[in-house]
Image (cartoon, rainbow, N blue to C red):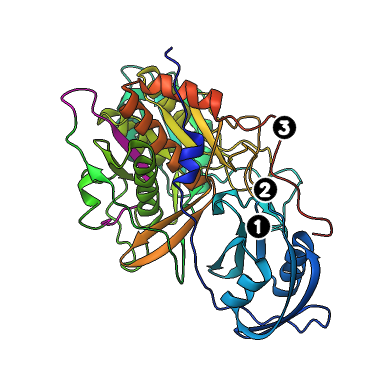
Amino acid sequence: MTTLEIPWSRWFAGVVAAWLLSAAPVLAANATALTWRADRVDANVKNCPLPQLLEQIASESGWQVFVEPDASYTASTKFKNLPVQDALRMLLGKLNFAVVPQSNAPARLYVFHTSMNQATQLIRPAIVVNLKKPLPPTIVPDELILRLKPGANIEDIARALGAKVIGKIDGLNAYRLKFDSADSADAARETLAGNTDIAAVENNYVIDQPALPQPLLASSTPPLTLQPKAPPSSGRLVVGLVDTAIQSLGSQLDVFMEKPVSVTGEAVPLPNTPTHATSMAETILRSLEDLTGGSTSTRIKPYDVYGRQPTTTSFGAAVGITQAVNDGCNPINLSFGSQADSPVLHDVITQASKQGVVLFAAAGNEPVTTPTYPAAYPEVTAVTAGDAQKKIASYANYGSFVDAIAPGTSVVDFQGQQYLVAGTSAATAYASGMAAAIAEVKSASLTDVQTAMRQKLAPIANSIAPAPSKGN
């Protein structure tokens, strides 16, 4: 295999941090240092190390605070009645910061000296980690997936079971059956146990829709200026984006998008909020812009496997991947996942891999080692989030199945408003864009690129971003 350079530092440098101001929550008066009153702040701080300062802000405000691990600063300042943005600037000196409002959750404060992607050390936990045995995956109770042997007739079998065929994957001779109730599905499973026409009976698992991006109140992140190039006569690259419904990215970026495909019925996205797929598409394009010099012949083809529902299924994801492969997409981006190990989904991915298709999937946004699928399948490159030192972010999955690390935040533009998307979904989109960019620029095969990325972007063994500060 040709040795490929993985431009990690340039990639991170291309991810410009968000600069924003959020209306701050009211902080209780603190006689020792800080007082927050609505959108105004008083402070009397002397020789206070950065960790202690951030701990105090976190404990008083309830904000979720992340800091770049090697950031250091000693605060000494005194002021009264400053707006929040000015107060943070005085408190943090030359360090950069971003405050991100969250829907139905505390705001997040990121403190860094290079890039917001590097702010991975959690000062106050964003979530409570449940270290007990994880709950079993959720199944669709009134459905079964049947694999038939050659020559078997699914319509005859479904009719005998009192079920409806609501989906199929021809290449696997696999069918999705819906029953009147969970009891009917259970009874059918028992009946099918002795049927010689049946190769396998499987559950269909639920896969939740990934989280939506959060709006930024202000940001200095520049808009994308990526320019299109005509695709080559051969070796054309199309990133398959298997995700939610997608919206227009605007006239300048829609040129990079191919006609979307819905495998579950047409969705009607909210008009004023970007969908997850829209955010992933722009993140892929930002990665392409960072690594191609500003112009690309790569295109993106979206596949909606959620429709109007908040969930999809392992079978639905398998159908979306199958169609993307059949349409010639390579690489394929899967910024979703669950704990469900689905044989039909794995077999679809195995077939795709044998055809030279490279797949990237999100490792998960819980700091546990529990496998997330489809990322945990060996044919898939599992992407987690972290910093340029290849340390995994404290909010991200660090299981042994993780193959590569990438920036975990992306700022996207939608109808004149900027949004922050954070987590291993964004990291996966960056990785997919990176693979396409390297393949395009280096005229390399995607399988070679995948191998190089796994070698050079692997997280540090048994290492995650620094643990939360003492007391948190």
Q: CA distance from mark 1 to mark 3?
A: 21 Å
Q: Amino acid at mark 1?
A: Phe
Which residue corresponds to the image point at 36% horizontal and 60% vertical from the top-left? 413
Dominant SS type (magenta): loop
Indicate the quadrant containing the N terminus: top left, top right, bottom left or bottom right: top left
Q: Residues within 10 Å of mark 2 (few under 14, many from 20)?
A: many
- Residue for badge 1: 66
Q: Position of residue 339 (x, y in %)?
A: 59, 40
Q: Amino acid at mark 2?
A: Ser
Q: Residues within 10 Å of mark 1 (few under 14, many from 20)?
A: many
Q: Nearer the viewer, residue 402 or 242?
A: 402
Is residue 233 a member of the stretch shown in magenta? yes
Q: Quadrant of residue 156?
A: top left
Please tell me the numbered disc located at residue 462.
3
Q: Position of residue 8 (x, y in %)?
A: 50, 35
Which residue corresponds to the image point at 48% horizontal and 37% vertical from the top-left? 361
224 left or right, relative to 128? left
Q: Give the mark toward the camera: 1 or 3.
A: 1
* Callout 2: SS: loop
Q: CA distance from mark 2 to mark 1?
A: 9 Å
* Callout 3: SS: loop
Q: Position of residue 177 (x, y in %)?
A: 39, 39
- Residue for badge 2: 394
Q: Is residue 129 above or below residue 31?
A: above
* Callout 1: SS: strand
Q: Is residue 420 above or below residue 372?
A: below
Q: Is residue 38 above or below residue 16?
A: below
Q: CA distance from mark 3 to mark 2?
A: 13 Å
